[in-house]
Image (cartoon, coloured by chain):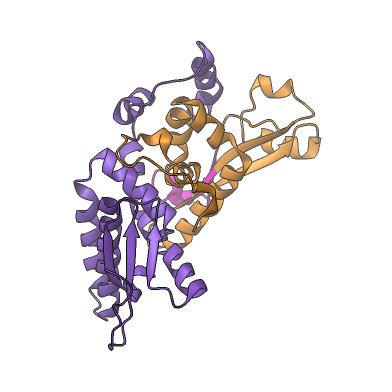
Chain colours: A orange, B purple
Amino acid sequence: MKQRRQQQMSWKALVGLPDLPEDVDEEILLRLPPESLILACKRVCRLWYNLINRPSFVDKYLRFNIQKTTTLRYNSNSSVSLFLKWTLQELSLHEIFVSHLRVCNHHQNHLSKQVLSLTTISTSTDDNAGGDLLPCVIQPVSLSPFVVE
Amino acid sequence: MSSSSTTTTTTRLLMLKASDGVTFEVEEAVATKLGAINNMVEEEGSEDLICLPNVNGKFLGMVLEWCKKHANNNTNSDKGNDEVNKWWDKEFVMDLDQNTLYHLLMAADYLSGTELVDLLTEKVASMIRGKKVEEIRETFKIKSDFLPGQEEEIRKKNSWAFE
């Protein structure tokens, strides 16, 4: 039995999404595509904003989606979302990522800070992928950079 | 009813008591689909009566209904089983109102019914997918608690990723 929710809950009370335990909220958000998380969910309320920005969520999101992609191999258009954490002052890493990700100006104000971003690598079968030499497309999909103090 | 329900059959029966005193008699194989019950059975061994002070009878009943269906379908070694389960799951979540959905989700989470939590969270996620901020707030009746300007700042910070 889970220890952390020993308190009595009023079962007649009307509950809403924000009343759900945080791990349940997390389970829900894990199932959403990055666009939905970043463009919509993050702006819904503080609770979700903080949850989505949290490194532990980012880690779970990555694992969950890799697992899902590997079990859904029949899906011809699969993609894996990767969260990248790097320190901007390390030039070598910075150079690698700056070529793929359009780094906003405000990042550069925190040169010594670590930044977390989400990149989606998709093995796309549509568009002009047929003649493309690269097997995957790296899209600059980013959660608002999470600055680790 | 007490724990005197001794049975000569091989399937052991457990008595689950909800917060409002409602009791359910269920086969062990059904109840142990819930991780929390499984742990209790393993730990406490002989106890046939399990009290669940955090789950209301209405929702415990629904959770057990789901467990029963899945336990039954799993014992039938029919190859169409997966399909049957999927169809049944779809029916199960189709007409749930939001309040029931959340209570059920909390009950399933509390009882560590992992598969049921998967099913229900997927249902909630499907209600969010493709919606805009305002639509999500409206659907789930969430009030924005950002300070004025904060939300706009978040929008600006993030929108470049999808230009």
**Which sits in the foreground, A83 or B61?**
B61
Residue that appears at 50% across and 24% down: B159
Q: Quadrant of residue B141?
A: top left
Q: Quadrant of residue B134?
A: top left
Q: Residue A27, relative to residue B49: is it above or below?
A: above
Q: Is residue A1 left or right of residue B58?
A: right
> What is the x, y in percent for residue A31?
42, 46
> What is the x, y in percent for residue B24?
27, 64
Q: Residue B136, relative to residue B63: is it above or below?
A: above
**Which sits in the foreground, A64 or A141?**
A64
Q: Residue A48, relative to residue B63: is it above or below?
A: above
Q: Is residue B129 left or right of residue A46?
A: left
Residue B108 in view (yes/no): yes
Q: Quadrant of residue A93?
A: top right
Residue A125 within the magenta-colored segment of the rendering = yes
Q: Which residues are magenta?
A: A120-141
Residue that appears at 54% across and 36% down: A51
Residue A77 in view (yes/no): no
Which quadrant of the rendered structure holds the C terminus of chain A?
A: top right
Q: How many marks?
A: 0
> What is the x, y in percent for residue A87?
75, 36
> What is the x, y in percent for residue B50?
39, 65
Residue that appears at 61% across and 33% down: A101
Residue that appears at 19% across and 55% down: B91
Residue A10 within the magenta-colored segment of the rendering = no
